[in-house]
Image (spheres, rainbow, N blue to C red):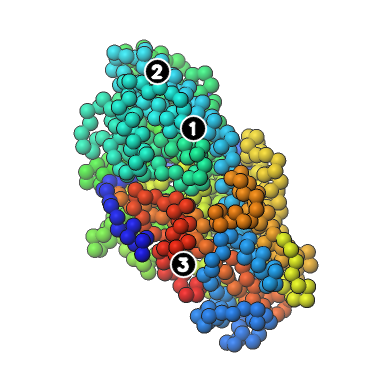
């Protein structure tokens, strides 16, 4: 199969990792814990500058009477509605539910077909989480096109102008090369943004070579601009992974977003390393330029909203360097003093060396035997740094060199999606990893213990500091083991694995939506027949629906507070919040063995129409106004989440919507209800061919995809 052939194609060898920043006149409140061999350090915001997370209370005692399916399903009322293969029927009898592969492109089509057949709907957490993804992606796309991209063009032009002024002043001094580098740096960004700007002859060769490398996406290469004028040798040269500039996520269809993606990737990845005085001089000059006119304010109008969407900075940036300047030079510093006062400059370099290195490495570096001080190699300034995320920190601790080698001398160069729920406390996820040999690396169990200890002791303020963390907090409710009082289909290992699949699939959507901003680790409505009882059921997870409602409220409030939300989207988020709250109420009633009202059954019955409304609203900004556009805009997506130093990336993907059939209790009798769940894929892929959604859709259309994870075999029928 082609995907296997692709997996075996071309490799390079180096180790990669992370990014982040803040703003001029902006105070950043961070909780930092020293990172040593024994502790985890995670930057968090204790309060949100945009919106606070408002808890939705949940109070229930699960009390569903236990039930057992007869071997011939004779105690299920509506078996005549369905035809199952022998394997699927056996799984349904054993587990109380079964998932069957299907070809649905979106959730709403499946639920609408149920209504017209009519078949009882089974409202899944998968479908509600997908709903939030659609709107998160839509809102981010809108803000980027209408606010961020125009601002980024302004900032780039302004910073280029300031850099040219600095170069004229510093020409002939030891700072000339640093100033020249900045001209090249902002010229590259300007060209990526399609600005009509001339290329200064001093940096013409380096700029053209950088643009060629970006367009060719050839993987890890020496950066001509960053290494310019330094006479660096071998491992001291800065290397960049140019495959990262392939527009993907929601950025690959729109020309404006493609250019925005490349420029932000440039601003987010290129590191002005502290170990290099010349690169640090460039960073200091950028810091001074940001403090000119309104440059810092414009920068902050992009930086702070992305904090709200994704998270705080992990790297050193504008604010840290501004504070550094004030500490050494006072409130005001002239370029002449920078160039002439060696004593203060040496003091600045000494103070700077004590600043914390990033938690996550996202730049290519060599093995620790060649470059033993990884902290020194990756510390530095980034103009618009990418963000620290919890999942990336988990991955970082669970790959080489942090987990060392296994007994066969093998190295774990890529993580797995299940590392995340395992670190968040899932024993089932850890057991799967153990069975697949992933826990056999020398330091894996110890690092996992430290991660669990840290993560489980975080309070709700940490978990709800921004939308990215809030999404993970919502997914955390999938990891609870369902005991007595829950429906029988939820009280087995197969359901735990279905919930894990929901977790990693929704997380894949999160990574897809935030692929530009989050750090990537480097390893090292109609009606049915009225005479048919088609009353359905909601997957009873009231905690998830409550957290999702709170997350939607936080999204709406936060974006409204900065005038980043229009009235139509605000109304849709209101409606989504109410839907989540309704399903929370229904879940509590189901678990408490209380009958639902006719209105609640009608809501379940009409769920497909609700989903279609949200789908149309979330895609209207890309021209979708009818369900006929579904073939070009399916639910399936792909994201690369980690990079192997030997030339591979880890791809996480969702595919077609699969059908789930669950035997549920309704008014004292059992029936089969049908709904939609994610399909999820995880596989390595050549670094120089990071997959876009379009390529992944083609692979799905031709059935040229890797197999599903083996751990799903106990609930997905062959």
Which of the numbered marks, if any, corresponds to residue 22?
A: 1
Which percent across, then down, holds residue 96? Answer: 58, 77
Give neighbour class at mark 1: few <14, some 14-19, many 20+ (Cα, 10 Å): many
Give neighbour class at mark 2: few <14, some 14-19, many 20+ (Cα, 10 Å): some
Left or right of 581: which side holds 366? left
Q: CA distance from mark 3 to mark 1?
A: 39 Å
Q: According to the image, label 3 marks what residue?
A: 428
Q: Secondary structure at mark 3?
A: helix
Q: According to the image, label 2 marks what residue?
A: 164
- Considering depth in this image, is 621 or 369 the residue closer to the camera? 621
Q: CA distance from mark 2 to mark 1?
A: 24 Å
- Mark 2 touching mark 1, by CB under 8 A? no
Which of the numbered marks, if any, corresponds to residue 159?
A: none
Q: Secondary structure at mark 1?
A: loop
Say whether disc 3 or disc 2 marks the residue closer to the N-terminus.
Answer: 2
Which percent across, then down, holds residue 337? Answer: 36, 13
Q: Residue at x 28, y 17 (%)?
A: 174
Q: CA distance from mark 3 to mark 2?
A: 58 Å
Say whether disc 2 or disc 1 marks the residue closer to the N-terminus.
Answer: 1
Left or right of 715: which side holds 552? right
- Considering depth in this image, is 535 or 578 the residue closer to the camera? 535
Give the farthest residue toward the front. Answer: 628
Say whether disc 3 or disc 1 marks the residue closer to the N-terminus.
Answer: 1
- Quadrant location of the N terminus? bottom left
Q: Nearer the viewer, mark 2 or mark 1?
A: 2
- Considering depth in this image, is 144 or 357 the residue closer to the camera? 144
Q: Residue at x 49, y 19 (%)?
A: 292
Could one spot residue 422 in this view of the protein? Answer: no
């Amino acid at each position: 199969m082609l995907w296997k052939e692709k997996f075996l194609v071309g490799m390079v060898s180096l180790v990669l990792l992370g990014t982040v920043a803040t703003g001029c006149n902006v105070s950043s409140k961070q909780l930092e814990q020293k990172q040593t061999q024994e502790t985890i350090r995670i930057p968090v915001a204790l309060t949100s500058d945009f919106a606070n997370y408002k808890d939705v209370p949940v109070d229930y005692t699960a009390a569903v009477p236990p039930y057992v399916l007869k071997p011939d399903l004779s105690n299920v009322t509506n078996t005549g509605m369905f035809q199952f293969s022998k394997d699927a029927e056996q799984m349904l009898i054993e587990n109380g539910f079964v998932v069957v592969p299907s070809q649905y492109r979106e959730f709403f089509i499946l639920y609408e077909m149920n209504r017209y057949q009519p078949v009882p709907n089974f409202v899944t957490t998968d479908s509600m989480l997908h709903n939030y993804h659609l709107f998160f992606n839509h809102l981010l796309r809108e803000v980027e096109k209408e606010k961020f991209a125009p601002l980024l063009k302004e900032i780039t032009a302004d910073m280029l102008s300031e850099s040219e002024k600095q170069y004229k002043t510093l020409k002939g001094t030891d700072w000339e090369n640093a100033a020249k580098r900045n001209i090249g740096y902002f010229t590259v960004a300007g060209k990526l943004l399609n600005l009509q700007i001339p290329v200064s002859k001093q940096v013409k060769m380096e700029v053209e070579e950088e643009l060629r490398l970006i367009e060719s996406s050839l993987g890890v290469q020496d950066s001509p601009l960053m290494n310019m004028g330094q006479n660096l040798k071998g491992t001291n040269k800065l290397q960049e992974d140019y495959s990262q500039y392939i527009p993907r996520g929601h950025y690959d269809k729109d020309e404006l977003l493609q250019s925005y993606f490349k420029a932000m990737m440039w601003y987010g990845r290129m590191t002005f390393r502290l170990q290099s005085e010349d690169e640090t001089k460039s960073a200091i000059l950028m810091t001074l330029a940001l403090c000119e006119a309104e440059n810092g304010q414009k920068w902050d109008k992009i930086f702070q909203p992305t904090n709200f969407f994704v998270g705080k900075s992990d790297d050193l940036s504008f604010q840290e360097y501004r504070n550094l300047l004030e500490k050494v030079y006072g409130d005001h510093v002239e370029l002449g003093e920078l160039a002439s006062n060696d004593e203060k400059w040496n003091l600045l370099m000494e103070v700077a060396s004590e600043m914390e290195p990033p938690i996550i490495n996202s730049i290519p570096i060599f093995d620790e035997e060649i470059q033993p001080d990884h902290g020194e190699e990756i510390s530095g300034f980034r103009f618009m740094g990418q963000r620290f995320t919890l999942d990336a920190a988990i991955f970082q601790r669970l790959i080489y060199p942090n987990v060392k080698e296994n007994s066969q001398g093998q190295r774990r160069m890529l993580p797995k999606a299940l590392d995340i729920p395992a670190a968040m406390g899932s024993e089932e996820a850890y057991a799967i990893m153990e069975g697949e040999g992933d826990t056999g690396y020398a330091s894996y169990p110890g690092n996992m213990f430290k991660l669990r200890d840290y993560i489980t002791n975080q309070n709700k303020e940490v978990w709800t500091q921004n939308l990215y963390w809030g999404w993970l907090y919502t997914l955390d409710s999938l990891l609870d083991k369902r005991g007595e009082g829950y429906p029988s289909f939820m009280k087995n290992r197969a359901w735990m694995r279905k919930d894990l699949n929901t977790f990693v699939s929704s997380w894949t959507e999160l990574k897809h939506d935030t692929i530009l901003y989050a750090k990537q680790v480097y390893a090292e409505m109609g009606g049915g027949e009225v005479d048919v009882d088609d009353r359905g059921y909601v997957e009873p997870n009231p905690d998830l629906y409550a957290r999702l409602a709170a997350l939607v409220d936080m999204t709406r409030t936060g974006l409204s507070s900065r005038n980043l939300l229009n009235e139509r989207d605000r109304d849709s988020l209101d409606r989504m919040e109410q839907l989540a709250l309704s399903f929370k109420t229904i879940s509590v009633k189901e678990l408490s063995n209380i009958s639902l009202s006719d209105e609640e059954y009608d809501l379940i019955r009409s769920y497909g129409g609700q989903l279609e409304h949200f789908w149309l609203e979330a895609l209207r900004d890309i021209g979708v106004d009818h369900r006929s556009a579904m073939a070009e805009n399916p639910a399936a997506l792909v994201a690369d989440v980690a990079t192997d130093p030997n030339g591979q990336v880890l791809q996480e993907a969702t595919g077609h919507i699969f059908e789930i059939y669950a035997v549920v209790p309704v008014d004292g009798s059992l029936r089969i209800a049908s709904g939609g769940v994610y399909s999820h894929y995880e596989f390595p892929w050549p670094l120089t061919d990071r997959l876009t959604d379009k390529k992944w859709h083609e692979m799905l259309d031709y059935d040229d995809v890797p197999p599903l994870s083996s751990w799903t075999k106990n609930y997905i029928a062959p």
